[in-house]
Image (tube, rainbow, N blue to C red):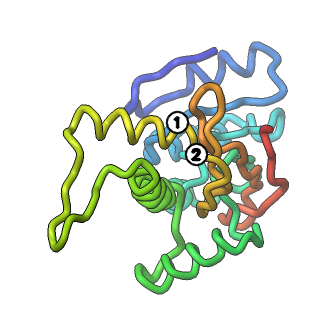
Amino acid sequence: MQKYTSGTKDYTAQLLAIKSSGADVVYGWGTYAEDCAIILRQFKQLGLNTQMDFVGAAGYVSQVSLNLAGANENGIYGVYDFAFEDPRPQLQAWVKAYRVKYKEDPDFWGQYNYDSVKLIADAAKRAGIIKKEGNRYLMMPLPEARAALAKALRETKNWPGSQGDYTADEYQDMIHNNAVVHVENEKPKLVKIIKLK
């Protein structure tokens, strides 16, 4: 296991330590695109891409990282929140709407916000946080509203979001699938959808 501080410009020591360990695969956890791009560039400069596979967390295959890293992304794998080739109707509708509105491909940051807001709104409705009396809308007292919303979220079952069907488990995790992608020609291509449950 190697650590670094975000904003570091030289990851050679960590990468060489991984090389000397005899590892077959590097798993990179990173959320800042600049760090991911530098790590991938140095990974290839050191020739490690010919000796081991690189699997990155979602940050490594986000659109910003792809833009910054360019060809250094080619050949890596990523565990990502979605793949454009996934035919699920909810995902394809979201991708289409995003492209129309923003004139670019979406990434997981946009997906988090989209699904989160819609899921919380659905849970708030199920919890009955707001009620209408005549022409007025009334909200239950804040402590009660928080408790009711939390309960409704914990009771979520098969809510259809763009990333998948959200179902709260015993750990309160809501989503149980990810896409494994392989970067080819600076684009992530679907390898497999992984279902965790």
Mark 2 Cα shell of 10 Å, populated few (<14), some (14-19), many (≥20): some
| Residue at image location 67% in from the left, 56% down from the top | 164
| Residue at image location 37% in from the left, 52% down from the top | 128
Image side of residue 130 versus residue 172, left or right? left
- Image coordinates of residue 36 in percent, x first then y, are 52, 42
| Residue at image location 77% in from the left, 72% down from the top | 87
CA–CA distance between discs 1 and 2? 29 Å
In which quadrant will I find the N terminus? top right
**Quadrant position of residue 143:** top left
Mark 1, secondary structure of its residue: loop
- Image coordinates of residue 93 in percent, x first then y, are 60, 78
Label 1, on which residue? 30
In the image shown, does 55 or 155 lie closer to the viewer? Answer: 155
Residue 156 is tagged as 2
- Image coordinates of residue 176 in percent, x first then y, are 70, 43
In the image shown, does 109 or 92 lie closer to the viewer? Answer: 92
In the image shown, does 103 or 163 lie closer to the viewer? Answer: 163
**Quadrant position of residue 196:** top right
Amino acid type shown at disc 2: Thr
Relative to 45, is 19 above or below?
above
In which quadrant will I find the C terminus? top right
- Image coordinates of residue 192 in percent, x first then y, are 84, 54
| Residue at image location 72% in from the left, 30% down from the top | 26
Amino acid type shown at disc 1: Gly
